[in-house]
Amino acid sequence: MAEIAASSWSLDENDYKRILEHMNALLQESSARCALLVDRAGQLLANAGEQLSFDPTAFASLTAADFSANDQLAKMIGEPEFASLFHQGEKESMYLADVGRRVILVVLFDQRTTVGMVRLKVKQTVTDLAKVFDEMFKRAPAPGTDRKGLLEGAEDEIDKLFGA
C-alpha cells in the first residue's frame, strides 16, 4: 500500500459521514465512551461519542507523537511497527490502532467494557475505515501532478497582474 502525503488528499462530507458511521457503530457495539480519528501529523479528523473533557487538538497531537515514538521502539526491538497500543489507567483506558499507516483510531473506555471487547470491535472498524481511506486516496491526484499545474497557472496570473 503506497503512502500518499496528507496534503494530497481531502476528506469530503460523504467520507466524513461514513467514518462517523463506523466510529459510532464501534462505540455502540463495544460500550466504549469515545472514539477519535487522528492523522499521523496530529490533526483531529473526527470524534464520536461522549463530549471530550480535554483539549482535542492537544490530545490529537500527543496521540500522533505517542504512536510515532512507539513505532521507533518497535524498530529498536526488531518489529516493523506496533499496529496497536493499549494504555490502562485506574478508571480510564485507551486503545490506539493504526488504520492503513495513514491515521490512528483512538478508543477511550472505562469499566463499562473490557479491553478484549474493544480490541475485537476495533479490528473490524479498522478494516472498514481502511476501505474508506483507500477510496479517498485513490481519488487523490498523484503527488505533484495537479498541484504543480495549479501553481504554474497561478504564477502566470501573478505575472500578468504585475506586467512581468
Image (cartoon, rainbow, N blue to C red):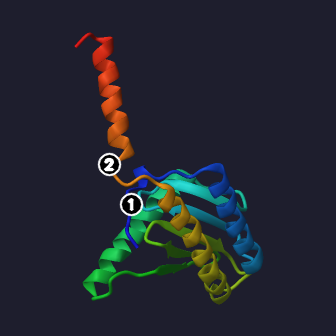
Of pointers 2 and 1, the one earlier in the residue sequence: 1
Please report the residue visible at 71 percent of the width from the left and 57 percent of the height from the top: 51
Residue type marked 2 = Gly
Residue furthest toward the right?
28
Are there few (<14), some (14-19), or many (20+) residues within 10 Å of tag 1? some
Instruction: Identify residue for label 1.
Output: 4
Q: Quadrant of residue 16?
A: bottom right
* Residue tagged 2: 144
Residue drawn at 60 percent across, 82 percent down: 123
Circle 1: residue type:
Ile
Q: Secondary structure at mark 2?
A: loop
User: Is the residue marked by circle 2 packed among few (<14), some (14-19), or many (20+) residues within 10 Å?
Assistant: few
Residue 103, given in percent of the width and then of the height, sits at: 49, 65
Please provide percent x and percent y for residue 42. Answer: 45, 57
Query: Which quadrant: the C terminus?
Result: top left
Give the side of residue 68 with respect to residue 43, left or right: left
Q: Does any portion of residue 106 appear in the rendered image? A: no
